[in-house]
Image (cartoon, rainbow, N blue to C red):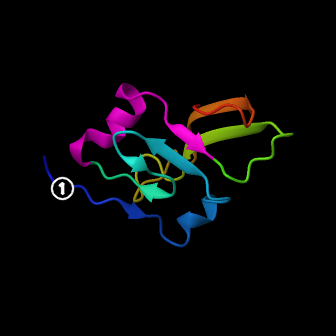
Amino acid sequence: MEECIFRKLDREDKTFCRGNLEIFYPELGDVGCTYIPKCNAYRKRISKEWISPEVRYQQADMNKKYVLIMVDPDAPSRSNPKYRFWRHWAVTDISVSTMNI
């Protein structure tokens, strides 16, 4: 397998990352606010092969419900973002007791 380098999003893209949200895949660890490289077919595996990630939000209020939307801000690529903000999935009515989305 080729080596993959996961890197944090740059300053401009990091504006999407708020509230210390963690997105945890057992195969990768926390990928919140991280650029997922194309190597080892990680992007395909995340979207089609692996189970949904565990989502952790430490600031969650037990009296509120949440909505989580996963988007790609520069789909299909940074050089050609013609489908920017492509919605991969949306989950609604999330309570604090929901441990795995």
Q: Residue furthest bottom?
A: 11
**Rendered residue at 71%/32% (across/down):** 97
Q: Position of residue 96 (x, y in %)?
A: 73, 37
Decide which of 28, 74 is in the foreground and name it.
28
Image quadrant occupied by the C terminus: top right
SS of the residue at dot 1? loop
Q: Is residue 9 left or right of residue 1?
A: right
Residue indicated by mark 1:
3
Rendered image quadrant of residue 49:
top left
Q: Position of residue 5 (x, y in %)?
A: 28, 60
Magenta residues, as a range?
Answer: 39-56
**Rendered residue at 49%/30% (across/down):** 52
Decide which of 45, 79 is in the foreground and name it.
45
Q: Is residue 34 left or right of residue 71?
A: left
Q: Position of residue 57 (x, y in %)?
A: 65, 49
Q: Residue furthest right?
A: 63
Whether 44 is drawn above or below 75: the answer is above
**Residue 84 appears anywhere in the view:** no
Whether 3 is drawn above or below 96: the answer is below
Whether 81 is drawn above or below 91: the answer is below
Q: Position of residue 76 (x, y in %)?
A: 42, 46
**Rendered residue at 42%/54% (across/down):** 80
Q: Residues within 10 Å of mark 1 (few under 14, many from 20)?
A: few
Q: Amino acid at mark 1?
A: Glu
